Amino acid sequence: MGKKIAAYDKVKLARDTARPKTEDFIKALFDDFIELRGDRLGKEDSGIIGGIAWFHGQCVTVIGHRKGRSMEENVKYNFGMPEPEGYRKALRLMKQAEKFGRPVITFIDTPGAYPGMEAEEHGQSIAIAEAIAGMSSLQVPVIAVITGEGNSGGALAIAVANSVLMFEHAVYSILSPEGFASILYKDASQSENACEAMKMTAADLYEFGMIDKIIREPADGMQSDWTAAFKETDKVLRKELAKYEGLTPLAVAKHRYHKFRRMDEKKIISRDM
């Protein structure tokens, strides 16, 4: 494992532009991916990518946040911050997956949902709430993989899963460290201290029972070895999907419901209280 890496350094690793993006995982892990666009209400949000693909002979629905590497790509994908249309699209694809009995696999990598005025006018909070509620009752297996940065409801909106997997140097939290520091410390420059206080690393979240498995990566991040990251993800996804093969649709939904209901029992109680 090597020496312990500070939470602030993990945030920097998670945000590294050289880290594989959702589209890279799709190309490496799935066959014959067909992208489906639009929320069926009037707009396509490219901050969310989703579609149908084959995974080791099984048809699945794949959904994820989309970030760019160049400034042009980041502007196109809104820097990985989906608008309400993106979350409505995601929910539409999940409901389609349920109709046809396809497992859903999601990839989380976002600084949060877009907070702009237009997004709020178009129902951002409602779209996120409906996505979370919709995922809660899906009668097909859902596997979520946190690959980089997962902040706020923008991440949770596609992460209500039977199995929540997280890369070792990814982060997952209620909001960005900068936002946390601005609210709690009244000083965004205190973000390094915020990272430690927020308990946002994979190790912390696994201890609290928030995630189900940590996907290991090199000390300098999976950006240094994409092939190994894809290979490990493939292995873990196959293992997790196999857990739900014998369950009825209702049992799959109940498993997810009880998983999230149990999170408040004991592991979520902070050791700092």
Image (cartoon, helix red, strand yellow):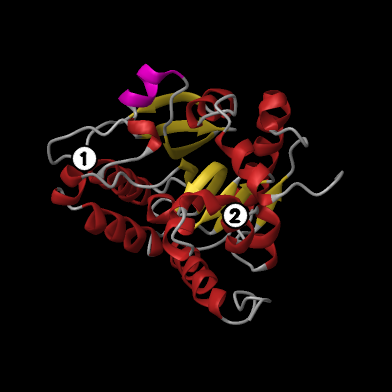
The spot of residue 78 in percent (x, y) is: 33, 32
The spot of residue 63 in percent (x, y) is: 42, 39
Considering the whole magenta stretch, tell me its main secondary structure: helix
**131 and 96: which is toward the camera:** 131
Say which residue appears at 49% left-offset and 65% top-offset. 256
Distance CA(mark 1)–CA(mark 2): 35 Å
Look at the image and give the residue range highlighted in magenta. Answer: 70-76
* Left or right of residue 67: residue 165: right
Q: Quarter holding the C terminus?
A: bottom right
* Left or right of residue 91: residue 11: right
What SS does tag 2 mark? Answer: helix
The spot of residue 268 in percent (x, y) is: 59, 74
Say which residue appears at 46% left-offset and 39% top-offset. 60
Q: Which residue is mark 2?
A: 195
**Is any atom of residue 239 visible in this view?**
yes
Q: Nearer the viewer, mark 1 or mark 2?
A: 2
**237 and 224: which is toward the camera:** 224
Q: Which labelled disc corresponds to residue 39? A: 1
Going by the numbered disc 2, the residue's amino acid type is Cys
Going by the numbered disc 1, the residue's amino acid type is Asp
